[in-house]
Amino acid sequence: MSDSSHSIPIGKLLRADNSQFVAGCRVRELETPAFGSLVRASLVDDTDVYGLITNISINDDGLVRQLVSGVSIPGEYTADNRYNRNLPVEIHVLTIGYQSEGQLRHQLPPRPPLSLDQLFLCGSDEVARFTSLGAGYLRHILRLTDQPIEELLVAHLSQARRVQDSLGNPEWYEDACQRLIVLLRDDYMRLTQVLDALSELE
Amino acid sequence: MPINYAQLEHSQGQFAADYATWQAQQSARAVELKSLLTEAAASPELLRQAIEEAEQQLPTLYLAKPTSEPILTHRPLPAAPESYTLIAADGSQIAPSRHRALQFGVVNVGLIKARIGSGEAPQIWVETELLTPQQIQTSEGNLISEDEIALLRDLAERKRIRQAVSSEDAEPVITLTDGPLDIFYRSTIQGEREQQVQRDISEIDEDLRRRGVLTAGYIDKPGSAMLSRMLAVFQCKRQGLPPDKKTDGLNLSDRFILRDILDQPGERSAIFEAISRGPKKPANSGAVAFFYLNVSGAEDEPCLVRVEFPLWVSESPRLVDALHAVIYREAQVLDSHPYPYLLHRAHELAVVRRIEADEVEAMLQSQLDPQFRARQRQSNKSYLKGLS
């Protein structure tokens, strides 16, 4: 298992398959997870499944819809709906690798995490460790079809670049960009979109 | 097919015609009663005498008694206090049933407390009480009725409310429960158990009164005809008849009588005392007052509810104004279907669904001795119903 001393628990697993999973958390726990962040689900068999947050969705119900149309809601009742009511925020995660028996891999795990497994936000040390293995895991991102992958890449690579730069590895980001160019060499349109988005990091 | 729709279709036309007739009769009664209300307002002394005679002569009575306010009073919405504490409680129960494998009863109370003006999220509690085998049986060994467990639930709500009130709460402190304040109105509980509940309720009421807490009951779409009965007594007095002489066609929900008087959003009626006397009514229960309140946000759609509170509150115009303003503001949070937000939340917290009742039963069964557990079976009727 990973050293979780710098990991922050951010939710528990609702549903999963090998390539993605969804965790639920309460609104008060929503201050830490962010779009594009590296997260880890720890399984009972000591396997860690790594992923990137691809979407955060806020659920509603009949009462929230009723309140939305109201003209005057005291601040206390807005807080009640956010913090007291059982409407979990859903954190959607794309699986990008796993660790088993101390070996980190940028492949899909043999088994998905199980419901109610704890989800942790990875600290800088884990981000460094995961990304130091190379940028091969970016292929999982490029397989997404219903997500804004350019935005996801910008969000994730800015985090990873910051961590690698702090470790004295400024070439890591360049290698990652080269990897993206190789992976997208047959899809000029998408490559253009990705590079255009990444230009915001320059 | 659960419903024979062909048969329904055959009779629905007649139903519509009968319903229209009934509505027309109600409208006619409303006109008659509004006129009588105006006449009673013009003769307050005669009305007072009529009610006092009825109180002296009739063993069973359920009517409205005017207080110091003229009965045609319609008060506009006052300003709400900037800060106050509102506590709502609602209960739910699992009633014991001989059809279950295990006979058990549970009272579940949801309570929510908001410090309005603080900006903080309200505090919430859910208290679940497993009733003892002694509590779910009558002295004859039968399982207690739905009414009795409802009484225990209402008592549990009051107890939780008292616990939730703190000396640090911003005043005024207003508590809200769903339904009439008098929790004995439907009780069939008797003997020592009844007396114990009465003692508990009296003690809670007195304690809350001493602490200046405004306990209110909210009755949505009220059906009671306390004004009708008041007017019936008035009519009898005027005609020289005894107060229990039935006056045909006079019973009509109060909200139909006051609809036109409380036509402005936020208006409340005069305060009346609820005179309730009957075989189920404890002699020492606290006096209750009420007003009707138009909780609608639109001028052309009056929506009248009844708000009950202890009679002592009516002696303080400041407290009555606070209650009036807070209840209206609270109902307006859910403005398209006005109902106090916190009361809805308390219900949401308390409600026990069938699946949860089954889970509690399974949990309790798991604690039984295996040999004893094997003998506990649900009724065949219940089992077969579960198949469909």
Image (spheres, rainbow, N blue to C red):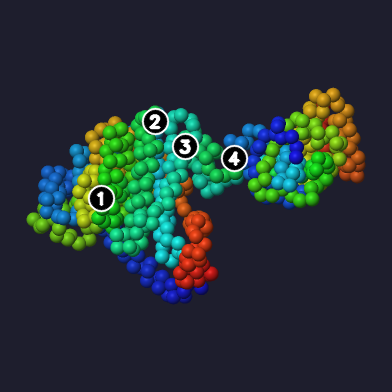
Cα–Cα gap, marks 4 and 3: 16 Å
Q: What is the chain identity of the residue bearing mark 2?
A: B
* Mark nearer the N terminus (1 vs 2): 2
Which amino acid is tagged 3?
A: Gln
Residue under disc 4 on the same chain as residue under disc 1: no
Q: Amino acid at mark 1?
A: Gln
Report the residue marked by disc 1.
Answer: B195
Q: Residues within 10 Å of mark 2 (few under 14, many from 20)?
A: some
Q: Which residue is mark 4?
A: A26
- Type of amino acid at the residue the image marks with label 2: Asp
Give the distance between the C-alpha atoms of the residues marked 4 and 2, in whole angstroms.
28 Å
- Disc 1 is placed on an element classified as helix
Q: Secondary structure at mark 2?
A: loop
Q: Which mark is residue B123?
A: 3
Asked whether the residues under the numbered discs 4 and 2 touch, taking CB atoms below 8 Å apart as contact, a structural biologist would say: no
The local crowd at label 4, few if under 14, some if 14 to 19, many if 20 or more residues have their Cα within 10 Å, is: some
Left or right: where does residue B42 sit relative to residue A16?
left
> Residue at the spot x=24%, y=43% of the render?
B286
Residue drawn at x 71%, y 42% is A41
- Amino acid type for the residue under numbered disc 4: Arg
SS at mark 3 in the image: strand
In the shown orientation, is residue B87 left or right of residue B270? right
Chain letter of mark 4 equals A
Disc 4 is placed on an element classified as loop
The answer to whether tags 2 and 3 share a subunit is yes
**Residue, x 75% and y 30% (percent of image)?**
A124
- Which x, y percent locates residue A37? 73, 36
- What is the C-alpha distance between the residues marked 3 and 1? 33 Å
Closer to the eye: label 1 or 2? 1
Q: Earlier in the sequence, mark 3 or mark 1?
A: 3
Q: Nearer the viewer, mark 4 or mark 1?
A: 1
